Image (tube, helix red, strand yellow):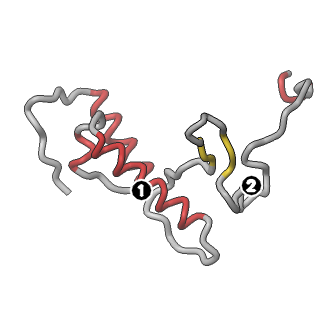
Amino acid sequence: MTLALQTSYVYGQVHGYRMSLWAEHLGVLENTFLAPETLECVHRVNQMAEANWLQYTAPTTSGMRGHLMVYPLMVKSDGSVTSRPGHETFPDVGGKVMGSNQLNIPDDLTA
């Protein structure tokens, strides 16, 4: 796929690196990614990440186009954070999405 370049942007090494990240993590390049600061780009990446999460958590296995997906947390309007309903643990390994509070972190995790 050929992307149309806009002359108002600088296309240097950072641009190339960002585009390679899009391709690697989303499995596709789109013209929308040429302007990552736009709401259109943010919404598109979020849409693709949500679709990947739904595929990842689906009861049947199917090939995912990329591997970027939303983290299974919800931030409420009051700022509180919870796990997504029905996803208190990760489907593949079973670890808690929210973790748990620890007064002391075990030495083997910090050494």
User: In the shown orientation, is residue 8 left or right of residue 12?
Assistant: left
Give the residue type that dot 2 points to: Glu
User: In the shown orientation, is residue 3 left or right of residue 51?
Assistant: left
Residue depicted at x 54% and y 64% = 54
Q: For numbered disc 1, what is the local secondary structure?
A: helix
Q: Quadrant of the N terminus?
A: bottom left
Check the image and report above or below for 61 versus 15: below
Q: Dots 1 and 2: beta carbons under 8 Å?
A: no
Tell which tag, 1 or 2, sits nearer the viewer.
2
Judged from this view, the residue extending furthest toward the left is: 7
Check the image and report above or below for 100 versus 85: above
Judged from this view, the residue extending furthest toward the bottom is: 60
Residue 88 is marked as 2
Residue 6, position in %: x, y?
11, 37
**Which of 19 and 98 lies nearest the eye of the viewer?**
98
Residue 111 is marked as none
- The residue under label 1 is 48
Residue 9, position in %: x, y?
15, 29
Residue depicted at x 75% and y 55% = 89
User: In the shown orientation, is residue 59 left or right of residue 45?
Assistant: right
Give the residue type that dot 1 points to: Met
For marks 1 and 2 on the same chain, the one whose residue lies earlier in the sequence: 1
Q: In which quarter of the image is the C terminus?
A: top right
Residue depicted at x 47% and y 53% = 49
